[in-house]
Image (cartoon, rainbow, N blue to C red):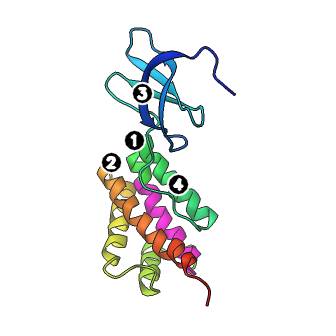
Amino acid sequence: MPWSGAAGLTSRKFTCGHCGSIVASSAGWQQQGGTGFIYLCTHCDAPTFFSRTGGPLPGVPFGKAVAHLPSDVEALYNEARRCTSAAAYTASVLLSRKLLMNIGVAQGAEPGKQFIYYVEHLAANGYVPPNGKGWVDHIRKKGNEATHEIALMSERDAQELLAFLEMLLKFIYEFPSKVPPP
């Protein structure tokens, strides 16, 4: 349903944080004094806010979608990605840690164990690519830091973990689904 009262603004090109489309829009509203603007996506019609000094809000989630994921793994991965679009980097790191546990259980690990068990299970059963155990351990350590210490996680922290998780998820789920059956 179209928004009512949208006015013509100076056209702005952006990637919509709602649908991921690259759009150019001139429909929206300007805040009194010209300090903020809301643009409507020409693809999904959702609003995106820009301030004079920043934006867009919501931002674009970091990383790419991964195909053929179990629903709970996909939900956690996408939630961790969406956290980056809202600058919720500590939340993204915490979800990245939790995602490792869920991947482990989806790959046959027993639920209810200590976290290190899931890291070891993934590594011992060939779910971690060569030289990747250090990255899995890095996710564990960053997740522990976010969980047990006062430190806030940075954008770089969240992006590092999500980049590795994207690759790990493709390695475990997406790439094997592309191999034709014998």
Note whether residue 50 is visible: yes
The amino acid sitting under disc 1 is: Ala
Q: Main secondary structure of the magenta part?
A: helix
Label 3, label 1: how many angstroms apart (C-alpha)?
22 Å
Residue 150 against residue 123 in the figure, above or below: above
Q: How many residues crowd around disc 4 within 10 Å: few (fewer than 14), some, or many (20 or more)?
A: many
Going by the numbered disc 2, the residue's amino acid type is Glu
Q: Nearer the viewer, residue 35 or 153?
A: 35
The reply to whether residue 151 is in sight is: no
Q: Nearer the viewer, mark 3 or mark 2?
A: 3
Q: Earlier in the sequence, mark 3 or mark 2?
A: 3
Q: Is residue 121 magenta?
A: no
Relative image position of residue 105 (x, y in whole percent): 56, 75
Tag of residue 155: 2
Quarter of the rendering occupied by the N terminus: top right
Residue topped by disc 3 = 12
Residue 34 is situated, as x and y percent measured from the top left of the image, at 39, 12
Give the alpha-carbon distance from disc 2 to disc 4, as whole Å.
Answer: 16 Å
Point 37% across, 71% down: residue: 136
Residue at the disc numbered 1? 87
* For marks 3 and 1 on the same chain, the one whose residue lies earlier in the sequence: 3
Up/down of 104 relative to 143, above or below: below
* Label 4 SS: helix
Determine whether the residue tagged by mark 3 lies in a helix, strand or loop.
Answer: strand
- Residue type (three-letter) at the residue carrying disc 4: Asn
Magenta stretch bounds: 93-109
Q: Which quarter of the rendering shows the C terminus?
A: bottom right
